[in-house]
Image (tube, grey):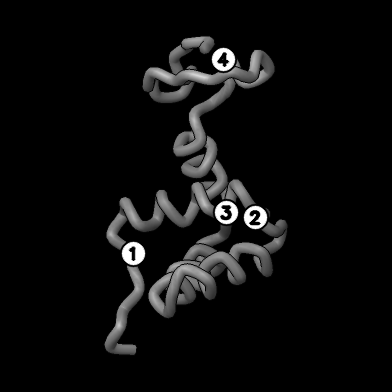
């Protein structure tokens, strides 16, 4: 296993893939992606996530530019960490 620290946040990372060493941690990359989205797209994605994970991922795919898997799964996890979750009452 190869060890390194994310250049964005300093978190300890490990991989068996040499080309991943010294790359940005997935949550740092997700945060950069999220910050670059227009506010209207962020709102659309958050509203979709409140309907469920699958609608959230589909909204990310429909964004311009699209957020594709597996990166969309990282963005979904980032939004969950921010408190955006499925609202069963909707």
In three-dimensional space, the C-alpha distance between marks 1 and 4, rounded to whole angstroms, equals: 30 Å
Q: Is residue 5 above or below residue 48?
A: above
Mark 2 Cα shell of 10 Å, populated few (<14), some (14-19), many (≥20)? many
Q: Residue at coordinates 34% horizontally, 89% vertically from top-left?
A: 90
Picture quadrant where residue 85 is located: bottom left
Q: What residue is pinned by disc 3?
A: 72
In three-dimensional space, the C-alpha distance between marks 4 and 3, rounded to whole angstroms, equals: 21 Å
Mark 2 and mark 1 in contact (Cβ < 8 Å)?
A: no
Q: What residue is pinned by disc 1?
A: 84
Q: Is residue 77 left or right of residue 71?
A: left
Mark before the other along the chain sequence, 3 or 1: 3
Q: How many marks?
A: 4
In three-dimensional space, the C-alpha distance between marks 3 and 2, rounded to whole angstroms, equals: 5 Å
Mark 3 Cα shell of 10 Å, populated few (<14), some (14-19), many (≥20)? many
Mark before the other along the chain sequence, 4 or 3: 4
User: What number is the disc on residue 22?
Assistant: 4
Mark before the other along the chain sequence, 2 or 4: 4
């Amino acid at each position: 296993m190869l060890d390194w620290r994310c250049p964005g946040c300093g978190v300890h990372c490990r991989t068996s893939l040499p080309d991943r060493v010294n790359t940005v941690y997935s949550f740092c990359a997700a945060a950069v992606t999220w910050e670059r989205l227009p506010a209207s797209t962020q709102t659309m994605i958050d509203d979709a996530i409140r309907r469920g994970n699958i609608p959230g991922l589909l909204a990310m795919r429909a964004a311009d530019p699209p957020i594709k898997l597996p990166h969309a799964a990282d963005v979904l996890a980032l939004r969950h960490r921010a408190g955006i979750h499925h609202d069963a009452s909707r």
